[in-house]
Image (cartoon, rainbow, N blue to C red):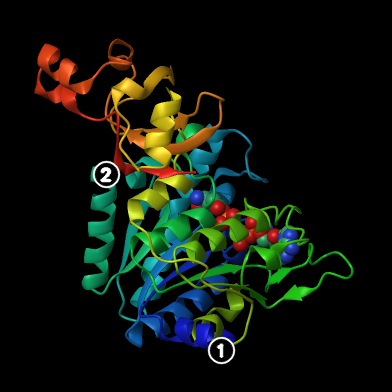
Amino acid sequence: MSDGQRQGVAEARRVVVKVGSSSLTTAIGGIDPERVRELVDDLAGVRLAGREVVLVSSGAIAAGLAPLALKTRPRDLATQQAAASVGQGLLMGHYTAMFADHDLGVGQVLLTVGDVTRRGNYHNAYRTLGRLLELGIVPIVNENDTVATHEIRFGDNDRLAALVAHLVHADALILLSDVDALYSSSPSKPGARRIDEVRSDDDLEGVDISARGSRIGTGGMITKVEAARIATSAGIPTVLASADRAEAALAGEPVGTLFHPTGKRRPTRLLWLKHASAARGELILDAGAVRAVVERKASLLPAGVTGINGAFTVGEPVDLVAPDGSVIGRGLVNYDSDELPGLLGRNTADLAAERGPGYDRTVVHRDALVLL
Ligand SMILES: Nc1ncnc2c1ncn2[C@@H]1O[C@H](COP(=O)(O)OP(=O)(O)O)[C@@H](O)[C@H]1O
Ligand SMILES: N[C@@H](CCC(=O)OP(=O)(O)O)C(=O)O
């Protein structure tokens, strides 16, 4: 079974590979060209063997530190963004030159949460990545750090990579880091045990992933395990391995930790909605609306909404809240928050007769809604 999954990784036609800052930079920050070259050589080999590769690369902020004479990763968002702005170009410069040595072209794709939660932007991102792959280009994805604010940040590229893997219908996700596998506790602790395979959440019980990662990386092991859970829940096998074993991991050799698929592929946009979106507000439902949405999988109509919180516009994610305060789902709302108060509790036919045909629309359509 595990050999089968490794075989699946080896045969994956389309792979998303994520590499962390700590695997691309020197201990004091700044790009380490040798490490970038080793990675590029491995990925180019895979690409030239006919497989499609999407690289999700961190390292923009780390690469921008030295040129700005910063000794450590800045705490404030504006300076992080400035560092990312300087570093992203440097990083792409290295990738462009090094892939060109293999006669391969690269394309930069910078994404924000909104790009993958709003219907139009999401299709756009999907189309662009698909076209780049058709053209034989290696897309290099990062978060668009220079414009992302706290509210609209993914914050970590591990989760972004899992969502990109789902977006491009990847057959495997490879998370490369400075650690060679998942351990039962921080590998620096005595007695930490290597975990070769994770088949379900049960295998993660008692595993301590709380220790902070490298000084250069952001998420540590928490975001990697979360990314693996997102990808495997959507049917994508995931391997966590050391960056210097990229070739072996992609060849399906027994390196790192293999996370087995736990679920099946689901409509892509809804996965984004659940894992990548921060709710911009809340809709408070009455008991009948909760039953309709949860049991009958119906759309939410104005008649079942008793109140709203927050400020949001059409197409943004909102939480659906039951009368007892529990969040039952998340959906993309069809009205602006300032329009809704006058519509609450009203019947759609009456609203349409009174205000015009546009007012017979749902507040959240069932196709744009996930239950939590
Ligand atoms: N249970 C664990 N198993 C493996 N590594 C762990 C664990 N808990 C914490 N870590 C830490 O997570 C680090 C990787 O995270 P991070 O530095 O953010 O990497 P990256 O820059 O590749 O995203 C490892 O170097 C390790 O010290
Ligand atoms: N977008 C940021 C990376 C954020 C991040 O997740 O970093 P890491 O934990 O090193 O994968 C950058 O390029 O610096």
Q: Position of residue 122 (x, y in %)?
A: 29, 49
For marks 1 and 2 on the same chain, the one whose residue lies earlier in the sequence? 1
Q: Residue flagged by tag 1: what amino acid is it?
A: Asp
Residue 311 x/y as whole percent:
40, 20
Query: In terms of secondary structure, where does tag 1 sit?
Result: helix
According to the image, label 1 marks what residue? 3
Determine the CA span between mark 1 and mark 2.
38 Å
Visible in this render: residue 59? no
**What crowding class fits label 2: few (fewer than 14 Cα within 10 Å), some (14-19), or many (20 or more)?**
some
Q: Quick check: 161 above or below 366?
A: below
- What residue sits right under mark 2 in the picture? 119
Helix, strand or loop at mark 2: helix
Residue 198 sits in quarter: bottom right
The response on whether ligand 2 sits within 8 Å of label 2 is: no
Is residue 58 something one can see in this rendering?
Answer: yes
Q: Residue at x 43, y 23 (%)?
A: 286
Camera-nearest residue between 216 and 131:
131
In the depicted structure, whether residue 342 falls above or below residue 60: above
The label shown at residue 116 is none
Counting from the top left corner in percent of width and height, residue 231 is at 48, 63
Taking the image as shown, residue 303 lies to the left or right of residue 161, namely left
Task: Name the amino acid type tagged 2.
Answer: Arg
Judged left or right of residue 177, residue 126 is left
Judging depth in this view, the residue of 61 and 232 nearest the camera is 232
